[in-house]
Image: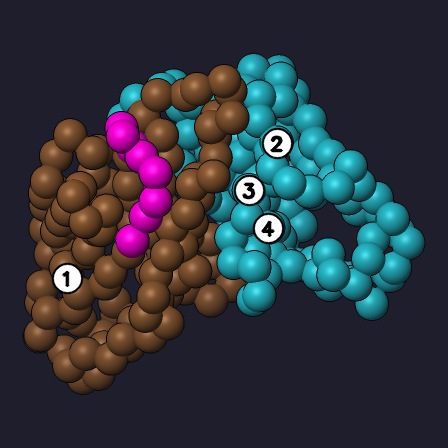
Chain colours: A brown, B cyan
Amino acid sequence: DQQVKQNSPSLSVQEGRISILNCDYTNSMFDYFLWYKKYPAEGPTFLISISSIKDKNEDGRFTVFLNKSAKHLSLHIVPSQPGDSAVYFCAQHPLFNAGGTSYGKLTFGQGTILTVHP
Amino acid sequence: KAGVTQTPRYLIKTRGQQVTLSCSPISGHRSVSWYQQTPGQGLQFLFEYFSETQRNKGNFPGRFSGRQFSNSRSEMNVSTLELGDSALYLCASSLGTSGRNNEQFFGPGTRLTVL
């Protein structure tokens, strides 16, 4: 079974500096990884994604890096802003569905609470 | 384009009752997935519907069920509520195709409290 782990429960960063959020995963030959941001009492908001055929994807202040040999991905936020303070989840989804067990199923990490101080 | 909507936003029930939650996906999205979020277990997949058919199911007891209508709107039902069912229930919609179009867009959730 796929597993996604975010080993840092929390991260505190100064405004304007870089925030680096990390995620480790198991299994996967051809997977799709996504990052979501979540405020309390709201649903997760999609931020950025990357497929396992790429090493990097960039969208504005957000960049996701994928290290396939280490089975590790990271989200970089530069520069960090106080409005970025939220819980960040990484999630995994197979690119190709095998046996129907992956339809519509994202496997989420436990989340990392990011606090950006002014 | 309107986002994913969920009703009701908050619900309080007592043990043994049943509850029905509703989700309206983004227009054009045919896949609806449901998740349960609790402090201890995080975000866990309940089931997914596509074109009125359940295609996938997570590891939850049979008390948790769902359905999808021809307009892609979906409902989930929890019968014989237990205290442990207290959670934020999230639905997410997507195009439902394989490959890169797997971004799921979430609704605001329904906060269920079981007393």
Q: Residue at x 56, y 59 (%)?
A: B41
Q: What residue would you read off at disc 1?
A: A77
Cβ–Cβ under 8 Å for marks 1 and 3: no
Q: Where residue B54 appears, x then y in whole percent?
A: 62, 22
Which one is closest to the eye, mark 1 or mark 3? Answer: 3
Reply yes or no: does residue A29 show up in magenta. yes
Q: Which residue position holds label 4?
A: B36
Give residue A80's quadrant in the image: bottom left
Q: Which chain is disc 1 placed on?
A: A
Q: Residue at x 60, y 57 (%)?
A: B88
Magenta residues span A24-31
Task: In the rendered structure, find residue B85 and report the number of the disc placed on it.
Answer: none
Q: Are marks 3 and 2 on the same chain?
A: yes
Is label 2 in a helix, a strand or a loop?
strand
- Image point (75%, 41%), residue name: B61
Quarter of the image where one finds residue A54: top left
Q: Is residue A74 above or below residue B45?
A: below
| Residue at figure coordinates x 11%, y 56% from the top left | A61
Using the image, tell me which numbered label, if any, was put on residue B45.
Answer: 3
Using the numbered discs, state the Cα–Cα distance from disc 1 to disc 4 in whole angstroms: 28 Å
Counting residues from the N terminus, which is met first, the one under dot 2 or under dot 4? 4
